[in-house]
C-alpha cells in the first residue's frame, strides 16, 4: 500500500525512492562478439600474394639499382654493356609485382570477411535510446 499525501502542506523532507531524477538519455547497441582469432585476422589479415609481391618488388628494386650502377659506369667511361634482357627482366619484375598486388586485392581474405561481418552486425543491430538513472545522493 502506498502512502499518499493529498491536500496537505508538506513541512519536512520526504524521501522518495525509485524516482527518476538526474536522468540521462543514452544510446545502446548490441556489441560485436569479437574473438581473439578474429582480432588476429583483422590485425594480420593480408593476402599471401601481398608477401609474394613485396618480395618480387624488393628484388626488382635491387636489380634496378644494379642497372643504375651499370649506367653510371658507362657515363664515367668504363665499358659495361647493359643487355636488353636486363631491361626485360626489370619490366617483368615490376609487372609481376603489380599483378600480384591486384590479385591480392581481388581475392577474398579473412580480414575482409570479418570486417564485412562486423559491418553487417552494426548495420542490422538497431540503436535504442533509453533513459539511465543518475546517481542518487
Image: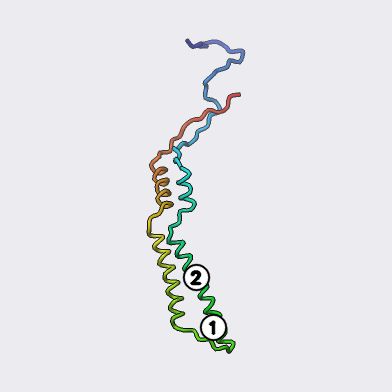
Q: Work out whether residue 80 or residue 104 is closer to the camera in this orientation and state it.
A: 80
Which residue sits at x=45%, y=56%?
A: 46
Q: Which part of the image, by quadrant, shows the C terminus?
A: top right
**Number of the label disc, if any, that sits on residue 100:** none
In terms of sequence position, does the residue under pointer 1 or pointer 2 come before the other? 2
Q: In which quarter of the image is residue 53?
A: bottom left
Residue at mark 1 to residue at mark 2: CA–CA distance: 19 Å
x and y, in percent, of residue 39 in the image: 48, 47
Q: In this view, does 92 lie above or below 13?
A: below
Q: Name the residue under label 1.
A: 71
x and y, in percent, of residue 13 in the image: 61, 15
Secondary structure found at label 2: helix
Q: Is residue 128 above or below residue 2?
A: below
x and y, in percent, of residue 49 in the image: 42, 61
Disc 1 vs disc 2: which is toward the camera?
2
| Disc 2 residue crowd, few under 14, some 14–19, many 20+, Cα 10 Å | some
| Disc 1 residue crowd, few under 14, some 14–19, many 20+, Cα 10 Å | some
Secondary structure found at label 1: helix
Q: Name the residue under label 2.
A: 59
Which residue sits at x=49%, y=30%?
A: 131
Q: In this view, does 127 lie above or below 38?
A: above
Q: In this view, does 55 lie above or below 89?
A: above
x and y, in percent, of residue 58 in the image: 50, 68
Circles 1 and 2, Cβ within 8 Å, touching? The answer is no
Amino acid at each position: 500500500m502506498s502512502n499518499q499525501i493529498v491536500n496537505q502542506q508538506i513541512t519536512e523532507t520526504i524521501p522518495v525512492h525509485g524516482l527518476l531524477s538526474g536522468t540521462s538519455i543514452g544510446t545502446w547497441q548490441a556489441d560485436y562478439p569479437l574473438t581473439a582469432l578474429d582480432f588476429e585476422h583483422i590485425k594480420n589479415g593480408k593476402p599471401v600474394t601481398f608477401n609474394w609481391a613485396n618480395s618480387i618488388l624488393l628484388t626488382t628494386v635491387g636489380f634496378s639499382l644494379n642497372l643504375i650502377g651499370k649506367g653510371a659506369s658507362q657515363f664515367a667511361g668504363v665499358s659495361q654493356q647493359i643487355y636488353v634482357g636486363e631491361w626485360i627482366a626489370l619490366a617483368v619484375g615490376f609487372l609481376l609485382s603489380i599483378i600480384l598486388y591486384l590479385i591480392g586485392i581481388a581475392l577474398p581474405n579473412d580480414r575482409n570477411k570479418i570486417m564485412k561481418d562486423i559491418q553487417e552486425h552494426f548495420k542490422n543491430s538497431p540503436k535504442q535510446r533509453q533513459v539511465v538513472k543518475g546517481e542518487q545522493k
